[in-house]
Image (spheres, helix red, strand yellow):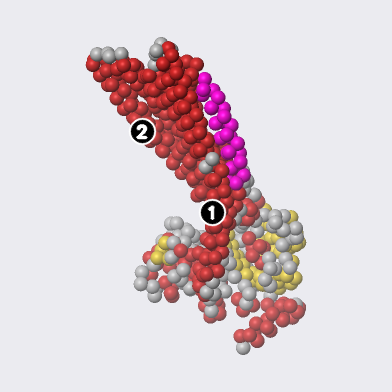
Amino acid sequence: MYKKLLASVREYKKESIEAPFYVSLEVVMECLIPFIVARLVNNIRAGCELRALLFDGALLIIMAFMSLLFGIFAGNACSTASCGFAKNLRSDLFRAIQKFSFANIDKFSTASLVTRLTADVSDVQQAYMMIVRTAIRGPLMLIFAFVMAFIMGGRIALVFMFTVPFLGLGIFFISRWAMPEFRKLFKKYDALNNSIQENIHAMRVVKAFVREDYEKEKFSRSAGDLCSDFTRAEKILALNTPMMHFCIDVVMIFILYYGTYKIVTTRGLDLNIGQIASLITYGMQILGSLMRFSMVFVMITLARESAARIVEVLDEVPEITSPVNGLKEVADGSITFQNVSFKYHSNKNFALSNINLKIDSGSTIGIIGGTGSSKSTLVQLIPRLYDPSEGVIKVGGQDVREYNLDSLRNSVAVVLQKNELFSGTIRENLLWGDESASDSRIQEVCKIACADEFIERLPEKYNTRIEQNGRNLSGGQKQRLCIARALLKSPKILILDDSTSAVDTHTDALIRDSLRKYMPDVTKIIIAQRISSVQDADKIILLEGGEVKAAGTHDELLKSDKIYHEIYLSQNNQEI
């Protein structure tokens, strides 16, 4: 896990090494300062000349300045290294997610992925910052301060040999006690983020049903539950402070009592005032370093859970990958399903069963069926958004698994059932289909998709800005823009997954006529609820329960299939 995370340090290795180096120098300066102070106190007590005092004073100022300078260098290097590491880690996570197939994405909730990209990366960043600075400083300070304490105080420094293990064990057990409480927080963070995301996304529904109070109460419960768990964990960690103060007080009392006793009884021969002053300082440094080390231990232990969640995403193997030396040319838009069955990982039952279809290049295919008949699942197998559990799918006469993924998907344009537009102008959204498309080409595809009529009425036309998720457009306008965007790819296969459901029947007919007229060589697969949207197709496929129940032209199905006939009569009666 740590090796996987450290791979994200990359160009910040230099700063990651510089920070501990400067910290080491800073610690050396801080540990030498009490030694010089002790010498200065003793010289003052002995009545030394002013020159000696000025020399020690100047030396202290220089050492303090150097400690400050090394601290600044360490802080700068540490900040650069930790922030750069977090930037790379977020980038690596985002790239990993971009490689996921739909099956991989199904394993993680959106809220969980957002938490991992934000809160979890921040936890790991804080831990890394502590590792390259505080985690180095603590042990070094502990070692140097111990050595200097024995040099200055001799046997009196043995008091640290008793307090340090006591404090260390206390910190260890407190941390072990607190960690399970912290681990509970992650799933609750995911749940809280999911609640926020769901509420914001469905804000219009919330307001339409006047459910603001209900949503507030639901959020307050989640936030309160999270607060309660966090408070419980923080209360356990708060025991560190009184335990630390207890140890400091015990050490100070012992040093002052025993040190004063030694000074009085030996008249300063075994121990002097300067040594007592330096021992107190070193004692504070030793116990302070342990306190910092305890916080580092807690942060690293907490961050380990975040790191495990991050690495879980980084280690996720995309289920769909491009083959080595995959085919880069799709010959034509012909499609063949041979004994194809498919089921989602979370389901035991097959969503599609034993599908056998042959679709000629350039033909128009209509797919209809009830809700849950797996119409969308069927077409998502063509561009390898999913791979079939059984059987073979061929495009252009070749198994889709033999194609380079980019080449296959560039030849198959899919307008999904859920229309997605991005913040930006209409032109910027359309250019997703072809970054190099000219204005005339953009206008051409918008005309085919019947999107030009409303675009030309907008004040800024193609430079009109689209709000997040296309909130300032109607459902039919978004659908037409998504169709135009797909057409810009100049695909060999065009899949419209219920993509004209929000447009009126007249516009729907105009779009189909335009596709037939301007794109005769493109294979067109149209999923629709209305038979009127597919009745002119070369072949209509009726799906039921994930199986092909009937296939044929409109007239053939009217005569031969009872279900199709009933649907047709029902829809025409509704229209009449």
Q: Secondary structure at mark 1?
A: helix
Q: Is residue 279 visible?
A: yes
Q: In the image, residue 64 lies at what x, y percent?
A: 33, 26
Q: In the image, residue 323 lies at what x, y percent?
A: 63, 46
Q: Is residue 164 magenta?
A: yes
Residue that mark 1 sits on = 227
Front residue (pair 269, 469): 269
Q: Find the residue positioned furthest to the bottom.
A: 576
Question: Tag on residue 72?
Answer: 2
- Sequence order check, earlier mark of 2 and 1: 2
Mark 1 burial class by Cα count in 10 Å: few <14, some 14-19, many 20+:
few
Residue type pointed to by label 1: Cys
For residue 162, above or below residue 119? above
Magenta span of residues: 158-183
The residue shown at (48%, 35%) is 245
Q: Residue 444, located in which quarter of the rendered image?
A: bottom left
Residue type pointed to by label 2: Ile
Q: Is residue 497 magenta?
A: no
Q: In the image, residue 261 lies at what x, y percent?
A: 45, 18
Q: Residue 192, located in which quarter of the rendered image?
A: bottom right
Quarter occupied by the C terminus: bottom right
Q: Secondary structure at mark 2?
A: helix
